[in-house]
Image (cartoon, rainbow, N blue to C red):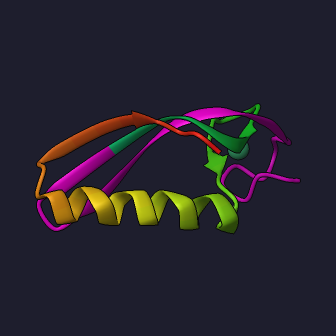
Amino acid sequence: MKCVLCKNGETKPGKVTTTLQRDETVIVVKEVPADVCENCGEYYISHDITGQLLSKAEEAVKKGVEIEVFEFVA
Ligand SMILES: [Zn+2]
């Protein structure tokens, strides 16, 4: 698809590292499948995968950790 940020680049499937924040908890997730803009590097994560990330984030918040880093596993 066309990148909505720079409006020039096309996105290509790739892997990104993304960060989520919930209250005091920061969650860093590596190897997340996403569409990455070849021009500006902006990335787009599907609703499906975002849902999985949020449930993981929820677990980390419940554990009360300040920072959690994990690799995305589909
Ligand atoms: Zn772009």
Q: Which residues are magenta?
A: 1-27
Residue 46, relative to residue 29: is it above or below?
below
How many discs mark residues in the rendered view?
A: 0
Estimate the x, y position of residue 1 in percent, counting from the top left.
Answer: 88, 53
Estimate the x, y position of residue 63 in percent, counting from the top left.
Answer: 16, 57
Residue situated in front as seen by the camera: 6 or 63: 63
Residue 52 among those drawn in magenta:
no
Residue 19, relative to residue 12: is it above or below?
below
Residue at screen point 68% across, 65% down: 48
Q: Which image quarter holds the C terminus?
A: top right
Residue at screen point 55% across, 61% down: 52
Residue situated in front as seen by the camera: 57 or 43: 57
Residue situated in front as seen by the camera: 73 or 66: 73
Residue 22 among those drawn in magenta:
yes
Would residue 45 appear left or right of 71 to someone viewing this image? right
Would residue 34 appear left or right of 26 to someone viewing this image? right
Would residue 10 appear left or right of 56 to someone viewing this image? right
The image quadrant that residue 9 belongs to is: top right
Estimate the x, y position of residue 60 in percent, counting from the top left.
Answer: 25, 55
Estimate the x, y position of residue 10 in percent, counting from the top left.
Answer: 86, 42
Assign ligand 1 to one image quadrant.
top right
The image quadrant that residue 45 belongs to is: bottom right
Residue 16, relative to residue 57: is it above or below?
above
Residue at screen point 44% across, 65% down: 54
